[in-house]
Amino acid sequence: MSRPDKNETYPYVVVLKSNNKKTIEQTGWLSSLFSIVLFSFSLYQDPKNIGANAFAISTVSIFIIIAIRKKQKKTIRFFPLLSTAGVGMILTTDIPFIGILLLIAAIVERRISIKKEIGFSDAGIKFNYKRGEKVPWSELNNVILRDGLLTIDFNNNNLIQVDTDDEDNADYEVTEDEFNAYCRSQLNKA
């Protein structure tokens, strides 16, 4: 399994629970509806604006695709819709500052929607959400996963405890005992 760093393979990858999924989704829906209303208002003022019509149709089409994906219980992202609407607002309407705000929202949504993962390999552990931070096993006292709670105890008395998200890692099922045995063996080697 190779997710935290695309150049390396990790025998174990733990997906961390995200507490802001609901907020991200609600904000995405509101921003999407807001952009559709603004395009409608802009088209009401100038119905012959071909560019605004094209971007409005694109935005509504992407909105429908997102709604279908939501109904199918698939992962949804608002980045395509918000970026399309943002560019459309900048290029075809009299409210380019709203387009800039939508583009900023698209970038922020994309950044905070990334699943936080920790990869475990023979060389150490790697956090995908901390740039370049790879921790060798020799810097760790203990690593244990129990009842969905991952605990990483560092030699310098730092402690990380995070909830894991079993739902997002269904493609790679492993028992806690198997994972803990692997971590113990790596710690004993270090």
Image (spheres, helix red, strand yellow):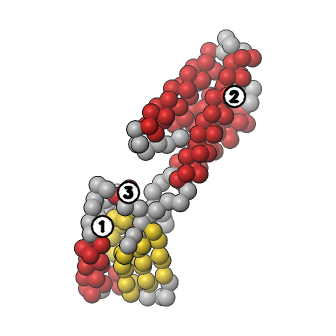
Residue drawn 50% across the image and 84% down it: 158
User: Upstream in the sequence, badge 3 or badge 2?
Assistant: 2
The residue at which mark 1 appears reads as 12
Query: At label 1, which amino acid type do we have?
Result: Tyr
Q: Is residue 34 something that shows in the picture?
A: yes
Looking at marks 1 and 2 on the same chain, the residue that comes earlier in the sequence is marked by: 1
Across and down, in percent, residue 71 comes to 44, 37
Query: Amino acid type of disc 2?
Result: Leu
Please name the amino acid that badge 3 sits on. Glu
CA separation in Å, label 3 and label 2: 37 Å
Q: Residues within 10 Å of mark 2 (few under 14, many from 20)?
A: some
Viewer-nearest of labels 3 and 2? 3
Please say if the residues under marks 1 and 3 sit with CB atoms less than 8 Å apart.
no
Mark 2 lies on residue:
38
Q: Is residue 25 above or below residue 144?
A: above
Residue tagged 3: 167
Which residue shows up at 73% across the image and 36% down it?
A: 97
